[in-house]
Amino acid sequence: MVNGPMFNPFEVSQRQLDKSAEKLDLDPDVHALLREPMRTLEVHFPVRMDDGKARMFTGFRVQYNDARGPTKGGLRFHPEETVDTVKALAAWMTWKCAVVDIPYGGAKGGVVCNPKELSAWELERVARGYVRAVGRFIGPEKDIPAPDVYTTPQIMAWMVDEYSTIVGYNAPGVITGKPIPIGGSLGRGDATARGTVYSIFEAAKVIDLPLQGTTVAIQGYGNAGFFAAKLMQELAGSKIVAVTDSRGGVYAEDGIDPEAAFDHKKVTGSVTKLAGTRSVTNQELLELDVDILIPAAIENVITEENADAVKAKIIAETANGPTTPEADEILYGKGKYIIPDFLCNAGGVTVSYFEWVQNIGGYYWTLEEVHRRLQEKMTRAFHAIHQTAQENNVDNRTAAYMVAVQRVAEAMRLRGWV
């Protein structure tokens, strides 16, 4: 399930933009500017390893578009990180921030490394080294990183400390996804999954699907997948019948206890071989006869090869880019209701925005207030997209792009860029 040459993620993001630009009859100059990131930074920095030797690391930071405000986006530590992946994710962050109507542009960053091979001390030195390398390009009013693949609140804590040391004052607003004691927001831990679930609530209403007792399959059982399972069970009364991770998965017709599956994974490293279940592959999970499918793992898992076999009524894209453009057309033709990724998983960046607002204001909200504001944002964004799709007779992803691109283009025109 690794990206091959036919699945360059940045080219996929450009094709999705091109489709919406055509529907919008977008000004060619605006379209050309939106097809490429405004700034792409590549850095190389040395880190002293535990054995005393220095090792060079490569990092990226892509600031895609800042017409609507400072750029915002996660930072990934991954051994196979590429600049094209980072560019694609920065583009999707731009549309994600616009579609939920928060005053940010999109960015993304990455460091080529395998955190599993680094000690805690080495990990801290990589985090601080990256901030020193990109420090002049980030800031609370400029570009605000956050955790992403293989990065954690602790890594964000080291980064905000390093940045504060560089500028000479405490600057919690430079990074979101921080631990609570140093300016993190309540509600950040399950924000991505909670945003997904709030989106599913609205999708179920528009297709007239009562959620109580619905069956759910989840591909990817990390933080987002686990909380999506837990919240769908608790808030919607749904039954989780299948979950998978990178090693495989499990299925149980009578339902899986999300907490038991997560505890099993923590002990064994995988959800596989959970008591009372039978095994299921990642591929098989996508084709199960369930009401709701939540791809929460990696990109490009639903393709033209398997889209016709997808049976779920609602596909809630918690992962970034899980569906290829060819698969989109097949699913739309079959009447499947897709909640596109940059709406569906926007709960994380929305609560990150709330964290930044609290940091800037120095006043912190209750958990209930965070949840209420998140549900308001997600619901309003969902219906803007649904209405656009219905009015223009297009699929939801194209509609989401139309809403987001229109908002970014308007900001660019008002600024006099084009």
Image (cartoon, rainbow, N blue to C red):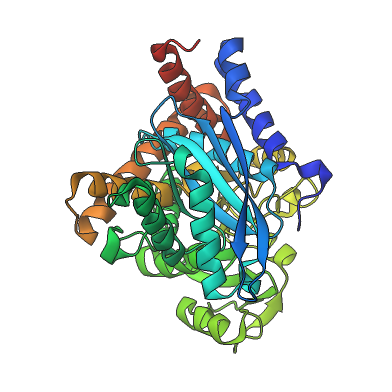
Q: What residue is shown at x 21% (from left), y 54% (from top)?
A: 369
Residue farthest along the front direction in this orientation: 52
Assign the N terminus to one quadrant of the image. bottom right
Q: Position of residue 317 (x, y in %)?
A: 56, 50
Q: What residue is shown at x 64% (from left), y 38% (from top)?
A: 332
Q: Position of residue 291 (x, y in %)?
A: 55, 59
Q: What residue is shown at x 29% (from left), y 44% (from top)?
A: 376
Kindly indicate the quadrant of the structure image that contains residue 103: top left
Q: Position of residue 354 (x, y in %)?
A: 29, 48
Q: What residue is shown at x 19% (from left), y 45% (from top)?
A: 361
**Residue 318 visible in image:** no
Q: Is residue 132 above or below residue 224?
A: above
The residue lying toward the viewer, choosing from 314 and 270, is 270
**Residue 2 visible in image:** yes
Total marks shown come to 0
356 left or right, relative to 236: left
360 left or right, relative to 385: left
Q: Position of residue 187 (x, y in %)?
A: 31, 60
Q: Is residue 189 above or below residue 254?
A: above
364 left or right, relative to 196: left
The residue lying toward the viewer, choosing from 58 and 414, is 58
89 left or right, relative to 391: right
Residue farthest along the left direction in this orientation: 363
